[in-house]
Amino acid sequence: MDSLLRVSNLNVAYRTDGDAVTALRNVSFTLEEGETLGITGASGSGKTSLGLALLGLLPVATKISGEIRFAGKDLKAGSKEIAKLRGSGISMIFQEPALALNPVLRVGKQMVHVLRSHGKKTSELRREIDHAFHGTGLTNPERIAHAYPHQLSGGERQRVAIAQALVCRPQLLIADEPLSSLDPITQGEILELLQRLKKDLNLSLLFITHSAAILSTVADRVLIMRDGEFIASGALSELRDNASDRYVRAVLSPAQEIASSRTVHSDRLEPPEQPSLIQVAHVSKRLVQNHFLFREKFAIFALRNVNLEMWAGTTTALIGESGSGKSTLARCIAGFETIDTGQILLNGSAIKTNSPPKQVQLIFQDAATALNPRLTAAQLVAEPMELAKVGNPTEREQRVLELLEEVGLDTDSRFRLPHQFSGGQKQRIAIARALSLNPQLLILDEALSGLDVPLQARMVQLLLKLQSKYRLSYLYISHDLNFLSLFAEEIAVMHEGTIVECLAPKALPHASHPHTQALFASSRKLHAPGLVEASVLDSSS
Amino acid sequence: MIRYLLRRAGRAVLLLVAVSILLFLLLQAAPGEFLSDMRLNPQISEETLVALRAEYGLDQPLPSRYLHWLESVARGEMGYSFAYNLPASQLLWPRARNTLLLTIPALILSWTIAIPLGVLAAWRRGRWSGRIFSAGTSTLLAIPDLLLALLLLLLALRTGWFPGGGAVSSLGSERFGDRIWHMLLPVAALTIGALPVILRHIRAALVEALESPFIRAAQAHGVSTVRILFSHSLRAAANPLISLFGLSIAGLLSASLLIEVVMSWPGIGPMLVEAIISRDLFLVIGAVMLSTLFLVLGSLIADLLLYVADPRIRVR
């Protein structure tokens, strides 16, 4: 039987200022009807370019060549015929549902646009939309259709995006990191939904992700990409068992790398009589929002009676869904925001907002926006020292060199600007900058979430090395429970503005709070047995 | 909604008051007054001048003159023109009507031309037609309004297809077709002058919108190009364009003053120039205040449109 999709010799090259950058090189593969094909690889390996090329959505100035055979029709890559398949033959969902929907149009209106563009009659619209929303588990289609995207939750938005992608009954759905911006509980739900829809509609899925754990639950077959080429293909378990290539191993089981570096420090002992570094006691904070147009004010509790204690040289993970107050707590500890009641003690003295403590430094998710694009790496790292008037210029220069070496950057590259570094390198610069004032606590607010999994693992290795050297403490904010339980000593679970439970990763299966249990359960779904060997989740099961 | 509008309107009134005070202060600081020229005339005695100053109220201190002016605004007179011996409002309103007769069609025309053209240019970005478009708007942008008006006048005089100025063929004849015929050139000058700025903004805003992820998602779901451009992108790009709409009203008004003078159109422009030269204090103030009023109304309309267009402003 003929395959649903056969791609042969697909080449894609982007043109930038006269240079051609190859994104895909001689890519060939087939996809059967009803099959789920997982595509994985480090960031920049060409995964997303592949998805966009199949839909003819690459920028105008891109060089494309190759043949695509879809549902018995031969098409040239990049041709106009491919555009006609969009929505009715091949459709796609994207990483960030908040950005995938037009913010100024009602959701129902956007559905109408999709249906109308495929020649549906006015009389059919209502029924089709209701049907599509019900199919994706949205029980109140009326409300959803009348809402603007900002009035929906993250999970609802991704459901709407899926409904929109599937409303004209395509045979192939390309899912580009559909889960990575969602919290674990929603991730589990959306994954279940995709699998159900696939069965109900006899869909083929092209699942693009850098998380091997997700692929192990969904994919029948996996293709691994590096620098625009397929370097391995087959069932995930086979690939993992026979992986001789270091890259394949890093992509498929990144946890091993952390495990190896963690064993070195696992005998680290915590003196019980040691006073705590940070003590958060009964902290509450209300956020008073000024109405944009009117003078009305309304308050929401961002933090409610939060208690947390941290010691020197330890890693505490803070987990919770978006909006649960994780970042607010982090900003309060860093002294950027005031608290209404309670107190936060650093080494026994209260943190003041008018002089945020130098011992606490924040690192943010997006290093690209956290670094001034007009300063060189050396200037960026030296800036905090200049502001704090530490040492003289030569001493500072010396310190910059030390720091860059410490975070694993080539010191010769210190005169480059941020855009000349890769994502991981940028985050290294941010870490070097944070270290420049010898902090005791680093707050990593989703600091690694933008990086692909092998890179995250390498960054954690670096963090652990720095931790043992300087007795640093980390407050690691994330929503990836599987990943953070590999290296955190303690996990604080945040829910609706308060910390509901603090526990060691080993104790997760015996969690007492229902929210922790739900988090753990949905993380288990995304977790591949045997994949993350060192994971405590695994050893406890 | 009502409260939002009331707040905006309140702000507009405050702005008008502030502008009027500033105007009084500036004109006070400017050298000379309406009677300065008479003073040079030896046949007019000092007593007559003092009497005239008292009659026009020019001998009074600034605050009391301002209060007098406010009073006359409340009566709907907007001060008194020394040169014409008439309340300023009687002179200004027909002139204002003529100015609006140019600016409103120019406003409508420039936007109706600019929106489809700008959308098209954004869609064709990076291709040859897009580049030709950019070169064209840059050239238009570089031509000063004055030169444009003179070029059009030259065209009118050489060919005789259009009238060389004025608003009607002969005084007293108020035929509709004749009016339109006289409007063509000044409106064309204003439209061509305003077009490149608006076009470039529409193109830039749309290019940005077209590169946003939700447009790619809509394309991936098979939404047709026309819908992508006119429903999705234009709506998403609307906010800065609506603000620009308010600004373009101001731009057209000030450009109109110049065009009117060059093309001898009986709008506020020529009157303002005349009043400034003869130091006809209240007429200057009246003309400037009127322009300010139109401008404020324009931005009020823009605010209202913004409120309607962006659900995120409404709900918050």
Image (cartoon, helix red, strand yellow):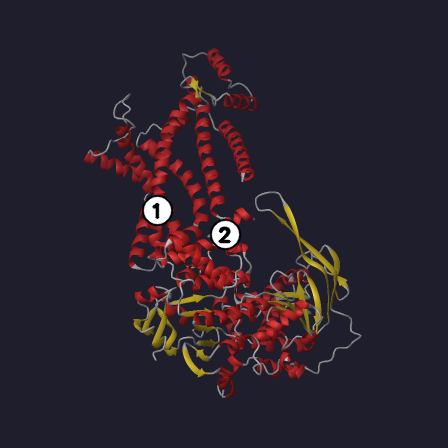
Q: Which residue is mark 2?
A: A146
The structure residue drawn at horizontal position 38% and vertical position 59%, both measured from the top left corner, is B223
10 Å crowding of disc 2: few (<14), some (14-19), many (20+): some
Question: In the rendered structure, which amino acid carries the disc numbered 1?
Answer: Ala
Q: Give the answer, above or below, for where A10 lies relative to B198.
A: below
Amino acid type at image mark 2: His
Q: Position of residue B159 (x, y in %)?
A: 19, 36
Nearest the eye: A477 or A311: A477
Q: Mark 1 sits on what residue?
A: B114
Q: Residues within 10 Å of mark 1 (few under 14, many from 20)?
A: many
Chain letter of mark 1 equals: B
Answer whether residue A519 is visible to the viewer in this image: yes
Could you tell me which secondary element the residue under label 1 belongs to?
helix
Mark sitting on residue B308:
none
Give the image quarter of residue A521: bottom right
Does residue A463 appear to the left or right of A19 in the view shown?
right
